[in-house]
Image: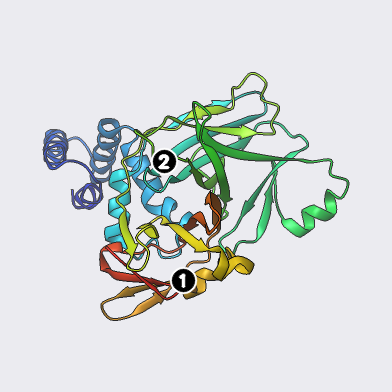
């Protein structure tokens, strides 16, 4: 049973379920000890574990070994943070399909306060047609997915010079349609899902003018696919909320940074007289530092992810911007003492 013990010791489940599962499998294996070979007993134990846990084992493997590699360069180096995500991420699968396309949401993780989320899904082209999916690799190069091939972006541009191919895209929005989608980015590292589809990571974020009273029902749809019958959309499974930490400027209390392992959101009021010619410049992140006990970490040195911004207020004297920036490296927020940005110190 040593191999079985090693396998089950790496599964995440409540302690009572763990002990009961282990006892049941040992009992059933011992009862058949005299009639089965060693390798058969291991096979029985593994089969029983899969039967008892259903999709839990598959979901665990998908989250632990594929989820973080798609989104974070150091996903396998931050065990405690990945375990936190494991506990929060939804493992319920939902599928959308018509005669041309099929996709299955495997995992979903959402930060309510930051209005940012991560999705892991499997995508299939069921028929060869004049559509494609533009995605990014880990170096932020564009690659193109077709039914039976993967093409680099430059090559595909030459092939599709006349624009005959249609670009598909995923979009996430609230079921009531009130939220404004700011961005949806898709990533592919060459891995295929267990069902044979392209394993795709999707980052999304949106912004609302007023703080939400409750988490909205989020819907994901495949757009530009001629989905007249609305078969290519699913309600995203509810995930546990990602814990965030808020840092407030010592100079301007209206300026704040909310940070989680997913990324950061910034609310910044800019003086028009002082900064009118350079109201919002993404170079602002070059001066943003996470100050920890033994060192400081410039954000742009480690995180090259995209940023989006929305103007949320405009008066005669100042503009207020809401900025969302993804992280491509997991960061332990508990280790941050304070944040420095544009000469201002932001404290908890």
The C terminus: image quadrant: bottom left
Dot 2 falls on a residue whose secondary structure is strand
Q: Residue furthest top?
A: 229
125 relative position to 330: left or right: right
- Image point (57%, 49%), residue name: 186
Please tell me whether residue 188 is drawn above or below residue 94 in the rendered image: below
Q: Depth check: 311 or 43 in front?
A: 311
Residue at image point 28% right, 53% down: 83
Q: How many marks?
A: 2
On the picture, is 308 further left or further right than 109? right
Q: Residue furthest bottom?
A: 294
Q: In this rendered view, identify the residue nearer to me: 140 or 336.
A: 336
Choose the circle earlier in sequence order: 1 or 2.
2
Front position in the image: 292 or 38: 292
> Horizontal and vertical percent for residue 244?
31, 53
The residue lying at 59 percent from left, 58 percent from top is 137
User: Front-most of 298 and 208?
Assistant: 208
Question: Which mark, by number, is residue 142?
Answer: none
Res. 240 image quadrant: top left
Q: Position of residue 282 (x, y in %)?
A: 57, 66
Residue at image mark 1:
302
Q: Residue 5, image x and y in percent?
A: 19, 49
Is 207 above or below relative to 94? below
Is 346 displayed left or right of 96 in the figure? left
Q: Nearer the viewer, mark 1 or mark 2?
A: 1
In the rendered image, which residue does mark 2 sit on?
108
User: Do the CB atoms of the residues marked 1 and 2 lie less than 8 Å apart?
Assistant: no
Q: Residue furthest right?
A: 162
Which secondary structure lies at badge 1? helix
The Cα–Cα distance between marks 1 and 2, rounded to whole angstroms, is 24 Å
The answer to whether residue 260 shows anywhere in this view is no
């Amino acid at each position: 049973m040593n191999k079985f013990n090693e396998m089950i010791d790496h599964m995440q489940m409540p302690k009572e379920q763990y002990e009961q599962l282990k006892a049941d499998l040992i009992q059933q294996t011992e009862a058949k000890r005299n009639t089965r070979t060693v390798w058969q007993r291991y096979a029985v134990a593994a089969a029983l574990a899969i039967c008892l846990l259903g999709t839990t084992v598959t979901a665990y493997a998908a989250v632990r070994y594929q989820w973080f590699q798609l989104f974070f360069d150091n996903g396998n180096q931050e065990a405690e943070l990945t375990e936190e995500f494991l506990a929060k991420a939804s493992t319920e699968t939902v599928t959308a399909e018509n005669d041309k396309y099929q996709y299955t949401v495997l995992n979903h993780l959402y930060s309510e306060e930051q209005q940012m989320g991560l999705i892991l899904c499997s995508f299939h082209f069921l028929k060869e047609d004049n559509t494609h999916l533009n995605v990014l690799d880990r170096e932020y190069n564009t690659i193109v997915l077709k039914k039976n091939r993967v093409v680099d972006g430059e090559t595909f541009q030459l092939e599709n010079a006349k624009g005959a191919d249609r670009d598909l895209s995923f979009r996430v929005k609230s079921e009531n349609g009130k939220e404004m989608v700011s961005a949806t980015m898709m990533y592919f590292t060459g891995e295929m899902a267990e069902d044979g589809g392209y394993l795709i990571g999707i980052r999304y974020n949106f912004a609302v003018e007023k703080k939400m009273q409750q988490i909205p029902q989020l819907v994901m749809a495949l757009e530009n696919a001629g989905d007249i019958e609305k078969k290519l959309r699913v309600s995203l499974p509810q995930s546990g909320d990602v814990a965030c930490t808020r840092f407030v400027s010592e100079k301007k209390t209206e300026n704040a940074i909310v940070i989680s392992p997913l990324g950061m959101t910034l609310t910044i009021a800019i003086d028009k007289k002082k900064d009118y010619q350079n109201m919002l410049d993404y170079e602002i992140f070059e001066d943003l530092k996470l100050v920890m006990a033994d060192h400081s970490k410039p954000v742009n040195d480690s995180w090259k992810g995209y940023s989006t911004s929305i103007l949320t207020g405009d008066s005669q004297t100042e503009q207020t911007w809401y900025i969302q920036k993804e992280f491509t490296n997991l960061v332990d927020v508990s280790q941050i003492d304070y944040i420095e940005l544009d000469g201002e110190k932001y404290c908890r």
